[in-house]
Amino acid sequence: MECRESCGACCIAPSITQAMPNMPNGKAAGEHCANLDPDSLNCRIWGRADYPEFCRGFLPEADFCGNSRKDALQILTLMEADTQAQKP
């Protein structure tokens, strides 16, 4: 599966605890990544050497992306909530 153009759900819904370019403290769930273009919702550093390894590992799949951007945001938001609920 290819990334959906102008989606950005994986750059918004999950929390990221690792440092990344332009966000040395990571980001909170629901916060837009600083590397996400606000107009196109595409990653401005995708494919560059400083593109984070953990982002490279998050590959689009129907189970995560659904059939639309709205689906993807909903699915990833629910997955994030489940992850947070499982933390001690």
Image (cartoon, rainbow, N blue to C red):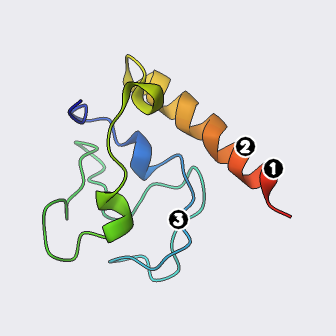
Looking at the image, residue 52 sits to the left or right of residue 49; the answer is right
- Dot 3 or dot 1, earlier in sequence: 3
Kindly report which numbered mark, 2 or 3, lies closer to the viewer in this rendering: 2
- Dot 2 or dot 3, earlier in sequence: 3
Q: Amino acid at mark 2?
A: Asp
Q: Amino acid at mark 3?
A: Ile
Q: Amino acid at mark 1?
A: Ala
Residue 85: mark in rendering: 1
Q: Which residue is mark 2?
A: 82
Helix, strand or loop at mark 3: loop
Query: In what quadrant of the picture does the C terminus appear?
Result: bottom right
Helix, strand or loop at mark 1: helix
Residue 10: x percent and y percent?
A: 42, 46
As drawn, the residue found furthest toward the top would be 67
Instruction: Kindly report the distance in space between the C-alpha atoms of the residues bearing marks 3 and 1.
Output: 16 Å
Mark 3 Cα shell of 10 Å, populated few (<14), some (14-19), many (≥20): some
Kindly report which numbered mark, 3 or 1, lies closer to the viewer in this rendering: 1
Q: Could you tell me if the residues under marks 2 and 3 are in contact, i.e. CB atoms within 8 Å?
A: no
Is 77 rendered above or below residue 43? above
Residue 45: x percent and y percent?
A: 19, 65
- Residue name at image x 29 percent, y 59 percent: 56
Residue 45: mark in rendering: none
Instruction: Kindly report the distance in space between the C-alpha atoms of the residues bearing marks 2 and 1.
Output: 5 Å
